[in-house]
Amino acid sequence: MSETLITAQQIQEIIPHRYPFLLVDKIVELVSYDRIVAIKNVTVNEPFFQGHFPGLPVMPGVLQLESIAQACAVLAHLSLKEELQNKTMMICGVNNTKWKRQVVPGDTLRIEVKFIKRRKPFFMMEGLITVDGQVCCSTELTAAEVG
């Protein structure tokens, strides 16, 4: 397992998300303006498992996308600290998304985001979630700075 560079408490100083919607536990790799790797430990206690699905707990695909979006926001904020101060990143486009494997309790998500380009106020990034080296979700995401 990689060393923690940024803890959950530090992530909460960067993005506004809180329980039960904070879907990034820590950052283990960071190259400003380039890429970030985040970790999300999925436990049986996640609130969404109560209804998705009873007897067959599966992490919703949209929440996988949200975990990628949160990693994108952390990368953007850490890359452009001064410029994005007091701004929030919001998803405004998702393309070429594929889900290849279910995410279940006990999985550790490795969320890798790569910066593609920026056309102010938009950020285009690629996201990939893997568990034990198996691809769970891949996507191209566009986010906008607001506020």
Image: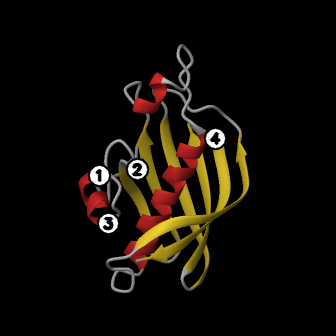
Secondary structure under badge 4? Answer: strand
Residue type highlighted by circle 3:
Ile
Badge nearest the viewer, 3 or 1: 3
Q: Nearer the N terminus, badge 4 or badge 2?
A: 2
Residue type highlighted by circle 2:
Val
For image coordinates 35% across by 63% down, the residue present is: 15
For image coordinates 46% across by 59% down, the residue present is: 71
Q: Nearer the N terminus, badge 3 or badge 4?
A: 3
* Residue 58 found in image quarter: top right
Q: Nearer the N terminus, badge 3 or badge 1?
A: 1
Residue type highlighted by circle 4:
Cys
Task: Classify 33 as above or below 22.
Answer: below
Q: Residue 146: x, y in percent? A: 45, 76
Q: Nearer the N terminus, badge 1 or badge 4?
A: 1
Q: How crowded is mark 3: few (under 14 residues within 10 Å), some or many (20 or more)?
A: some
Q: How far apart are marks 3 and 4 (CA)?
A: 26 Å
Residue topped by disc 2: 24
Q: Which of 90 and 59 is in front in this view?
A: 90
Q: Nearer the N terminus, badge 2 or badge 3?
A: 3
Q: Distance between the residues labelled 2 and 3?
A: 12 Å
Residue topped by disc 4: 136
Task: Classify 53 as above or below 109.
Answer: above
Secondary structure under badge 2? Answer: loop
Q: Distance between the residues labelled 1 and 4?
A: 23 Å
Q: Which residue lies furthest to the top in this view?
A: 55
Q: How far apart are marks 3 and 1 (CA)?
A: 10 Å
Residue topped by disc 3: 14
Q: Distance between the residues labelled 4 and 2?
A: 16 Å
Q: Given contact means CB atoms under 8 Å apart, are the residues at marks 1 and 2 in contact?
A: yes
Q: Residue 8: x, y in percent? A: 29, 52
Residue topped by disc 1: 8
